[in-house]
Image (cartoon, rainbow, N blue to C red):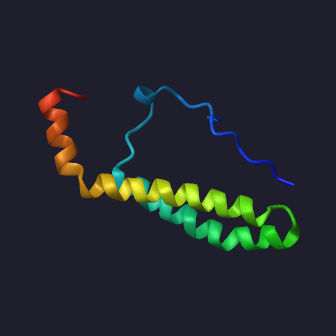
Amino acid sequence: MSQPIPHDWQAPLDAPEERPIVTLAHQIAEVRRELAMRKNVYPKQIARGTLRQGEADECMRRLQGVHDHLIWVERNEADIREVAKEREWR
């Protein structure tokens, strides 16, 4: 059985300044691709008994939340940039 990933788990990554920038549009596209893949893969894993339905539902709920947040950022990008500019955020 697969184990749930703890909320504080992080993959080791290079420092942000060492990674290339990923545009908001590319982030949204990647999350959509991942959601579609999971919709295809999770039922098979559930049928094999390697993933529980509740775990699959929770993972999908979390990733859908990421998607929804990115869409909110996309819709409000101009306002976010304006506030960042006013407050001299980088």
Q: Is residue 27 above or below residue 39?
A: above
What residue appears at the point 17 percent right and 26 percent down from the top-left corner?
Answer: 88
Q: Is residue 7 above or below residue 88?
A: below
Q: Position of residue 48 (x, y in %)?
A: 87, 70
Q: Quadrant of the N terminus?
A: bottom right
Q: Nearer the viewer, residue 20 or 12?
A: 12
- Give the side of residue 90 with respect to residue 24, left or right: left
Q: Position of residue 13 (x, y in %)?
A: 56, 31
Picture quadrant where residue 25 is located: bottom left
What residue appears at the point 64 percent right and 57 percent down from the top-left corner?
Answer: 59
Q: Position of residue 90 (x, y in %)?
A: 25, 29
What residue appears at the point 65 percent right and 35 percent down from the top-left corner?
Answer: 9
- Give the side of residue 55 with respect to residue 63, left or right: right
What residue appears at the point 79 percent right and 67 percent down from the top-left corner?
Answer: 45
- Give the side of residue 63 with respect to residue 76, left or right: right
Q: Is residue 15 above or below residue 41?
A: above
- Give the side of residue 13 with respect to residue 83, left or right: right
Q: Position of residue 87 (x, y in %)?
A: 16, 28
**Label tally:** 0
